[in-house]
Image: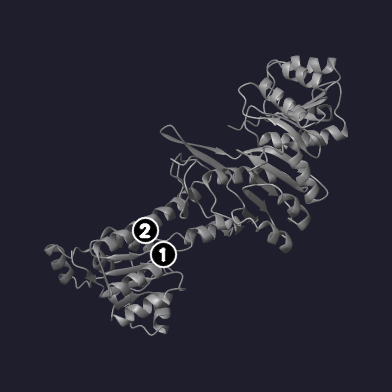
Amino acid sequence: MQPVKIKSALISVYYKDRLEPLVELLKQHGVNIYSTGGTQTFLEEQGAQVVAVEDLTDYPSIFGGRVKTLHPKVFGGILHRRDNQSDIAEREKYEIPPIDLVVVDLYPFEETVASGASEADVIEKIDIGGISLIRAAAKNFKDVLIVSSREQYDEVVELLQEKDGATELEDRKRFAAKAFKVSSHYDTHIFNYMNREGEIQAFKQSVQHSMPLRYGENPHQKGTFYGNLEDLFEQLNGKQLSYNNLVDVDAAVALAAEFEEPVVAILKHTNACGCATGDTMKEAYLNALSSDPVSAFGGVIIANRTIDLAVAEELNKLFFEVLIAPEFDADALELLKTKKNRILLKQKPVELPTKLFKTLLNGVIEQDKDLATETEADFKTATKRQPTAEEKKALVFAAKVCKHTKSNTIVLATDKMMFASGVGQTSRVDALRQAIEKAQSFGFDVSKTVMASDAFFPFPDCVEIADKAGVKAVVQPGGSIKDQDSIDYCDAHNMAMVMTGVRHFKH
């Protein structure tokens, strides 16, 4: 097909910024421009000759602007088929001018919802005319070019400059696909807002931004991240994040968010191999590293306080993939950037989603994020011996780490650091033995720790093994029909056990 020269355009946009170069180009090519309201005023200020849509339709904008472009002379100009003689005859009969280019953006619905606006204000930001114009122009891509977002202005200007004000079918089809991406995203967010209570069962998600990854979990798998990482992180150094980096970073962010006190956590394969608090970031890091300096190699590290030079000097001795922190002192950043591939992320205070979902079999499963975090107030002592004040603090710490560790899991910790964990085991007994052996292999005295379990003990074997290793305080959800067996063992051996009533499986 021959290129189609743009002779007429309809421009009606909410945001006027970045539009000037396109307007100037249309002026240069003598394009006849139709517009409405504030857009018309803006275009005329740019020196463009504009025909008001009201003059085209012989109808004013009505209902406070709710109805402006919804008219046969507008939609007929967009939708009539240029190669259909019947359409051409009808267009001429009703004096409908052709429209070759439609430039529209949509009312800022997402932004209005995010601002916390009232429902009345949100509803007014549900675009009707704009979304209809986008769909009409995109449907008739054989004849019409649709520009559906200000993010596309630079691209369309470059295209029209290259092709002397004309477009080819493949160009129009590409922009039509972009338009349906915009419209489907918009409608998805409207549905999710209207269905906030979840009464209508449907899985609807839409993410506009995407980032290709080097590969997926393994080199033979393709990978893409859908989302805008720049909203959450400022990358200060290093190579592009990989699929596995992102999975570990997600786990690190979730774990660090549990702590108000200064904390450093080191993660491998989404599990903490070290986690500790301290009076300084250096102390917290060194304690976290001491839990398992072998596994820390090549890990992801997160801190919830500023990285200063003292901790940076220690960090610089270790090979790690990613470091996340809310701030970096200038001298610390200079030192850490000496390794060019080392990924340094400055974390921004962004609210994260409270729903989780993943593909499964031939569908998707969705669940609420696990937002339950137990404090001392949630502990119900099941044994005769009450935990000491120090043990209670340690149980809170251990439970936080346990919540973010792959099931079945056992965590051994004090009130300031994790000594070891047994992760992802098919048996809770194996998880406990793994944790004890690991702690002892790095020279830790297990008798100084408490034990946390992500789920209940169906038998007393775990408390017995813990007791023989010297552990004297335990936190677990409870709920087994044989809870009493574990309670009885603890009572017979002067152990304290608290139950929370909350299980934290993590698969």
SS type, badge 1: loop
The quarter of the rendered structure image containing the N terminus is bottom left
* Mark 1 vs 2: CB contact within 8 A: yes
Count of numbered tags = 2
Asked whether the viewer can see residue 374, the reply is no
In-front residue for pair 164/92: 164
Res. 281 visible in picture = yes
Compared with 355, 72 (above or below) is below
Q: Position of residue 384 (x, y in %)?
A: 85, 20
Quarter of the image with the C terminus is top right
Quadrant hosting residue 133: bottom left
- Which of the marked residues, 1 or 2, is nearer the chain's N terminus? 1
SS class of the residue under badge 2? helix
As rendered, which of 133 and 334 lies closer to the eye? 334
Label 1 to label 2, Cα distance in Å?
9 Å
Specify few, some or many for label 2: CA neighbours under 10 Å numbering under 14, 14-19, or 20 or more.
Answer: some
Q: In this orientation, which residue lies closer to the viewer: 217 or 141?
A: 217
On residue 113, which mark appears?
A: none
Horizontally, residue 503 falls left or right of residue 122, namely: right
Q: Residue at x 49, y 46 (%)?
A: 195
The quadrant where residue 36 appears = bottom left
Residue 259 appears left or right of 19: right
Disc 1 marks a residue whose amino acid type is Ser
Q: Which residue is mark 1?
A: 149
* Residue 293 drawn at (x, y percent): 72, 39
Of residues 269 and 64, the one nearer the viewer is 269
Q: Position of residue 261 (x, y in %)?
A: 78, 47
Q: Quadrant of residue 497?
A: top right
Q: Is residue 52 above or below residue 110?
A: below
From the viewer's perspective, tell me whether residue 152 is left or right of residue 442: left
Type of residue at label 2?
Lys
Q: Which mark is residue 178?
A: 2
